[in-house]
Image (cartoon, rainbow, N blue to C red):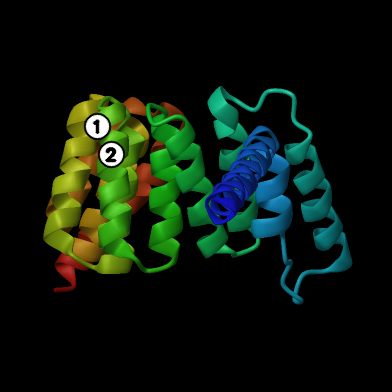
């Protein structure tokens, strides 16, 4: 009988101990959840500035770091805080850290297309083009009328991936969605002339710019003359 009671008491002690462990663990989890911006960035992704930065640059990044950690408007679920820290980390070349921060921002507020766009750029800087395109496409899904997202993807395929056919499709998509936004027209004109070497088609788009942007018309007309000389020199 004593042995039975002894076993019961031992079981109760074990259950009590397990219960205390669960309670303590839950308390720690709640603490970290409530303090996640400070905890995450201080202990998991604290800034480690590269040695090539000047003392002034290091101070600027450090000051900005503290500004972000103490920002009053952190966005929905602290998403803006994570986004800003990703931008900061990108600024000094820590793209892996930027990816972590932008992913956190996106998980906290999945409907903000800016976070997917920033994530895409960070992936592109890591030469992870598959993930970059996927993140860009998520940005398009959330903000289908934002031509700059298509434009940036076109530039990614032009200069980093060097897939001219895909780049052309993305530029055309940007033109269509932006109703011939002049910045997009200019980017496409440069693509046609510098990458595709399609000088005749490039001239058409530089002419659109010359007709619509009188302030810079002289520069655009000079570009047209330059392309005409390239055609004659073939």
Name the residue nearer the viewer: 166 or 136: 136
Nearer to me, 23 or 149: 23
Q: In this image, 186 relative to 21: left or right?
A: left
| Position above or below: 181 against 62 | above
Label 2 with label 1: CB-CB less than 8 Å: yes
Q: Can you tell which mark lies on residue 154?
A: none
- Which residue is label 1 attached to? 141
Residue in the foreground of this view, choosing between 28 and 225: 28
**In this rendering, does residue 135 appear at all?**
yes
Residue ID for mark 2: 138
- The Cα–Cα distance between marks 2 and 1, rounded to whole angstroms, is 5 Å
**Image location (x, y in percent) of residue 62:** 81, 53
Q: Give the percent coordinates (x, y) of residue 226.
A: 31, 59
Residue at image position (24%, 36%) is: 174
- State the residue at coordinates (75%, 39%): 69
Residue 39: x and y in percent read: 70, 47
The relative height of residue 197 versus residue 221 in the rendered view (above or below) is below
Q: Residue at x 32, y 47 (%)?
A: 135
The local secondary structure at tag 1 comes to helix
Write down the quadrant of residue 205 in the picture.
top left
């Amino acid at each position: 009988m004593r042995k039975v009671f002894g076993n019961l008491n031992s079981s109760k002690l074990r259950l009590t101990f397990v219960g205390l462990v669960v309670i303590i663990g839950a308390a720690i989890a709640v603490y970290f959840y409530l303090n996640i911006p400070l905890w995450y960035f201080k202990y998991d992704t604290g800034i480690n500035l590269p040695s090539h930065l000047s003392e002034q640059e290091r101070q600027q990044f450090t000051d900005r770091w503290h500004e972000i950690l103490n920002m009053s408007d952190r966005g929905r679920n602290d998403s803006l805080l994570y986004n800003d820290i990703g931008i900061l980390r990108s600024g000094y070349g820590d793209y892996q850290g930027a990816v972590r921060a932008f992913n956190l921002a996106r998980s906290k507020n999945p409907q903000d297309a800016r976070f997917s766009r920033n994530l895409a750029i960070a992936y592109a800087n890591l030469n992870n083009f598959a993930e970059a395109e996927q993140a860009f496409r998520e940005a398009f899904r959330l903000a289908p009328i934002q031509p700059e997202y298509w434009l940036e993807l076109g530039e990614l395929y032009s200069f980093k991936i060097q897939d001219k056919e895909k780049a052309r499709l993305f530029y055309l998509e940007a033109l269509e969605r932006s109703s011939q936004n002049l910045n997009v027209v200019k980017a496409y004109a440069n693509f046609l002339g510098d990458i595709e070497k399609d000088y005749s088609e490039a001239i058409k788009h530089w002419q659109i710019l010359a007709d619509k942007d009188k302030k810079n018309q002289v520069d655009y007309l000079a570009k047209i003359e330059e392309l005409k000389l390239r055609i004659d020199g073939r």
